[in-house]
Image (cartoon, rainbow, N blue to C red):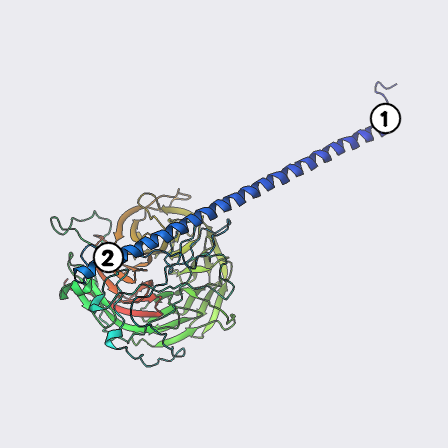
Amino acid sequence: MSMYPQHRGLPQNASRLNELLDQIRAEFDNQVRLNEGYEQQIQQQVQEAQLVREKVYQLEQTHMTLKAKYEEELLLLRRQLEAARGGAPQPGMPGPPQHGGPSNVPPPPSIGMGNNLFQGIMTGQGGQAGLPPQPPPQEQGPGPQQHQMPQPPPGLQGPPPPQPPPSQQPPFQQPYQQGPGPNGFPGQPPQSTASPGPGSKRGIGGRPPTGPATPQINNPMPYPPGPGASPQVHNQPTPDHRGPMPPHPGPGQLVNNALGDLDPDRLPAHSKKTRDDWFVIFNQQVPRTLDVELVHTLGHESVVCCVRFSHDGKYVATGCNRSAQIYDVNTGEKVCVLQDENVDISGDLYIRSVCFSPDGKYLATGAEDKLIRVWDIQNRTIRNTFSGHEQDIYSLDFARDGRTIASGSGDRTVRLWDIETGAAMLTLTIEDGVTTVAISPDTRYVAAGSLDKSVRVWDIQQGILVERLEGPDGHKDSVYSVAFSPNGRELVSGSLDKTIKMWELSAPRGISNPPAKGGKCLRTFEGHRDFVLSVALTPDNAWVMSGSKDRGVQFWDPVTGYTQLMLQGHKNSVISVAPSPAGGFFATGSGDMRARIWSYRSVGR
């Protein structure tokens, strides 16, 4: 006889099992209700945070309105004081800087991914996260209204527009100077240059675009074509920029880099160079070693977002609305227009970045439609189309291996592509929108600037971060442009904080999985009066170039940090600057719907 009782209670055990299942089901339902309650609480907190953001936004608008009102009153009083003193502005009393006005204010952004990306580089906006900055006031200076001149058809060069009478001749544009401009003409504030972006999908009052909005000029001014020579720059030995800062030129003599504060009419003839529609101011406190001259003016039918030379220096490409264009540097003639005819013709589609392949056969373009197109220039056909970015593409760079392309986008990624395989090689993700990318001369590293004020450098082969350039010596606002030095040992960056910085890279070589380090900031170049939108180094490593929203281009000595000259050759923001890899020339692209080719040469050496 078995010592264990027989299992005669099977129906009772089944009842017990059902009871346990009911308890589990009841507990599960209870947890579901708790989760729903937590989700409701989270949603309420998100709504409260949004209300707080909107309240802070409204307070900011009130503050900006009051500030603008006070500055208008101060400006009126200052002008009355100047008139009482004889009409000329007094030294040390420049006009107030421009601030965003309260008109046409977009709604505050909702909480969500990517909302701390900036709205636009041309609308007076900063790059900090959180509250969106405001567009500039739509003010016009005294004088007759300027009318838009008709543009010639693409590929045809029309006659130069007629010049206005002397009393209506457009003056040189002194950035943000409210007193009389050069040649006795009144100054003119910058024009609004914001565009809605691709297509007509961004309605008024909608969500701000997640990146630097390409500007659209409302009232472009006509210019006469200017003559210019094409001198070549002398070969200079590559300087070492890592040494200590040299002393000032003389006892008690402080070098002033703020050349934009100077009035050309009050400067001696030897410290300036004045032409019909452009001028140069040379820094009087350092030896003059450089000269520039206008070579060609390249008219466009929209804002010129980017300029780039071919590696042999014979051609320059520009990116504008719906097309990329290629010009002969020697003659200034347009030799090619690259436009995707399969794209919807309605609305805008700005080409934000262009880049030649090293052999000059291909041109890569990045646009607002999130696509990278690699064009076969000779056949005018698209060789590759790369898709994958989720936001506008702001920057491209072609590696010297001839097959790798780096791209940066507002979707917070840097991506590398192989044109031979037609596939993505690597995706690098960061915390905020990517505004600019550059590949090192040895094709080992890729650098990127971001809205979060940092510059990052990755090892391409290993896909690891090796440098993060930030901190107390770093930028205080979004970084809009980065460029490697020709030797690859330094990196320059330009920012919305109005400065350029030169970094000594300290990435370890030959070490697998090294920790990310912060490079040393060798120099900070200060002197621009507004956002620095583009930076580059000349191929001989002798000069740092920068273009700014203050409409100026400056050449900086990378050893001393002093500016050599300031060129004012555009009537709107200088969005892009690019030196020729062959030396002797550089190009500028601007919101005034023109690109210009310039020559530079050494003097007095």
Task: Please identify the quarter of the rendering in which residue 310 is found.
Answer: bottom left
Rendered-image quadrant of the N terminus: top right
Task: Check disc 1 and report the residue beneath it.
Answer: 9
Q: Residue at x 86, y 23 (%)?
A: 6
Residue depth check, mark 2 versus mark 1: number of the one nearer the observer: 2
Image position, residue 573 (x, y; %): 33, 63
CB contact under 8 Å: marks 2 and 1: no
Secondary element at tag 2: helix
**Kind of residue indicated by mark 1:** Gly
Q: Residue at x 27, y 50 (%)?
A: 524
In the rendered structure, find residue 605 and report the number of the disc placed on it.
Answer: none
> In the image, is 24 to the left or to the right of 544?
right
Image position, residue 199 (x, y; %): 50, 66
In the rendered structure, find residue 78 and report the number of the disc placed on it.
Answer: 2
> In the image, is 233 to the left or to the right of 218?
left
Image position, residue 290 (x, y; %): 19, 63
Vertical arrangement, residue 511 with respect to residue 600, above or below? above
Along the viewing direction, whichever of 143 and 198 lies nearer the viewer? 143
Vertical arrangement, residue 281 with respect to residue 128, above or below? below
Q: Residue at x 26, y 53 (%)?
A: 526
* Alpha-carbon span between mark 2 and mark 1: 102 Å
Secondary element at tag 1: loop
Task: Estimate how packed mark 1 is, as few (under 14), some (14 to 19) or many (20 or more) residues with alpha carbons within 10 Å.
Answer: few
